[in-house]
Amino acid sequence: MTAPMIYELRRPAQMESGKTYPALFLLHGIGSNEQNMLPLVDELENQFFIFSIRGHLPQPPGYAFFTIEGYGKPHRTVFDEGVNKLISFLDYACSKYPIDEKQIFLLGFSQGAILSMTLGLTLGQRIKGIVALSGYIPAFVEEEYIIKSVENLSIFISHGEMDQVLPFEWGVANDEYFRKLGAAVTFRTYPVGHTVSAENHQDFIKWISEQLEK
């Protein structure tokens, strides 16, 4: 089976035959690439299979997973295609590598956070944990997608209080939406713009490590 998307892989340093391992899938922001987010998860490389996925659409100076037709409004058909490609990639990774399918995590920034939250809603029980950094949930996802149960999902949502790209209020709305659906939500805010601060980084690494112990 050929990989449906281009990706970088980091494997656990000490692997045992016959053992399965947690998996962490990284989704970058618009105009970035599969190298961008790997430095954020250096501390987790010994515990996880880490897949950093490249968006399939050219978006200089890098790539994107979908295009935008208006503020907070992705092109629906392009967005749907991106979601389907990512689901195919998860299927591919789980079939090719010794992954513990009860320990699948998603980590995305901006566009990657939008897709990570959408995948959590679409795949339900398949996803154990999500880190959504500075994203939003498109209205058509809430209104038209088939939403699976997220009562066993844990999600870390963070947003910059001075985010000049995606309003802080959208982060608050993410928190409220997932709580309403029954997910276990950790919501953190930081006095920064559209970025990942050092404190935010430390907080989500600690959060991911705690989820592994549950």
Image (cartoon, grey):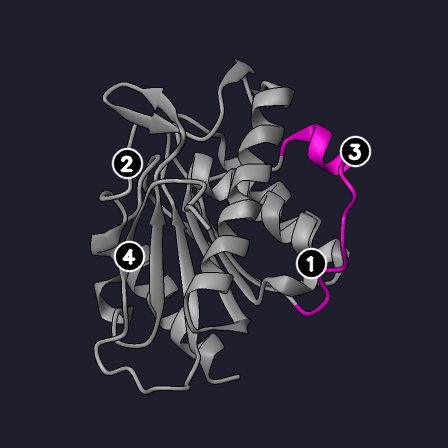
| Residue 50 on image: x %, y % | 34, 61
Disc 3 or 1, which lies upstream in sequence? 1
Q: Which residue sits at x=34%, y=86%?
A: 17
Where disc 2 sits, the SS reads loop
The label nearer to you, 3 versus 4, is 4
Three-letter residue code for mark 1: Gly
Residue marked by disc 2: 33
Tags 3 and 4 touching, CB below 8 Å:
no
Distance from Cα at disc 4 to Cα at disc 2: 13 Å
Which span of residues is magenta-colored?
A: 138-152
Residue marked by disc 3: 143
Disc 4 or 2, which lies upstream in sequence? 4
| Residue 57 on image: x %, y % | 40, 24
Distance from Cα at disc 3 to Cα at disc 2: 30 Å
Disc 1 or 2, which lies upstream in sequence? 2
Tags 1 and 4 touching, CB below 8 Å:
no
The label nearer to you, 3 versus 1, is 1
- On whether residue 144 falls in the magenta region, the answer is yes
- On whether residue 81 falls in the magenta region, the answer is no
Crowd around label 1: few <14 · some 14–19 · many ≥20 (10 Å): some
Say which mark, if any, is on residue 9: 4
Distance from Cα at disc 3 to Cα at disc 1: 16 Å
- Residue nearest the viewer, comparing 96 with 13: 96
Q: Which residue sits at x=41%, y=26%?
A: 165
Distance from Cα at disc 3 to Cα at disc 4: 35 Å
Residue marked by disc 1: 124
Question: Toward which corner of the image does residue 185 lie, by quadrant?
Answer: bottom right
